Amino acid sequence: MALSRVVLASGRSVDLTELHLSATYGNVLEGYPCKPLNDLAIAGLLRSAERFHPGVPVHLIPPPREYPDQFAGAFGPVEVLPAVTCVGSFRSEPLDPGHDRALYRSRLTVAWFQPTSHIPSGYDAETELLDVDWEQLATDEEL
């Protein structure tokens, strides 16, 4: 059973079967949000997503970056990512119409950032998540 069902902009319904949420800056002990720190956080999120379900394609939705401060510190200007990192495992009907729907599912792991710990559902998700090009990014898998 899925945690939720998301309807992509393409009209395809995808089931969210697993979701890992964490605080974007939860492990930062000192310093401030800046481009070098954020680049490391994004790379770490991508590595985590790749380990989430080996063999399943991974798509990283590039996060928005905000610059709330005009002053730069030692590592450059303050640059803030959304507060929550997400790695979700999604599945849907097979991509290949020749595959038996009882034996195949399409799968994709998606990594993204969002401002709250809200679980995406229906049409209520970050726009970038709803715009995922499932047909180009997902792959069919035999059950």
Image (cartoon, grey):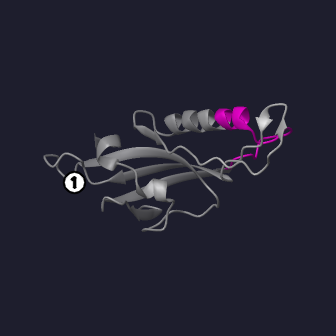
In this rendering, position of residue 48 left or right of residue 74: left
**At 46% from the left edge and 54% from the top edge, which residue is drawn?**
129
Q: Is residue 14 magenta?
A: no
Q: Which residue is mark 1?
A: 102
Which SS does the magenta portion mostly show? loop
| Callout 1: SS | loop
**At 46% from the left edge and 49% from the top edge, which residue is drawn?**
89
Q: How many numbered marks, from 0 up?
A: 1
The spot of residue 69 in percent (x, y) is: 79, 49
Circle 1: is it few (<14), some (14-19), or many (20+) Cα within 10 Å? few
The spot of residue 78 in percent (x, y) is: 77, 43
Q: Is residue 38 magenta?
A: yes
Q: Quadrant of the C terminus?
A: top left
In this rendering, position of residue 137 left or right of residue 103: right
Q: Quadrant of the N terminus?
A: bottom left
State the residue in front, 139 or 43: 43
The spot of residue 106 in percent (x, y) is: 31, 47
In this rendering, position of residue 59 left or right of residue 116: left
Q: Residue furthest front?
A: 70
Query: In which image quadrant can residue 36 be found?
Result: top right
Q: Amino acid at mark 1?
A: Ala
**At 35% from the left edge and 41% from the top edge, which residue is drawn?**
137
| 114 relative to 110, above or below | below
| 31 relative to 105, above or below | above
State the residue in front, 64 or 59: 64
Asked if one can make out residue 142 in the rendered structure from this viewpoint, the answer is: no
In this rendering, position of residue 41 left or right of residue 15: right
Residues in magenta?
23-40
Query: In which image quadrant can residue 4 be found?
Result: bottom left
Query: In which image quadrant can residue 58 be found?
Result: top left
**At 64% from the left edge and 61% from the top edge, which residue is drawn?**
116
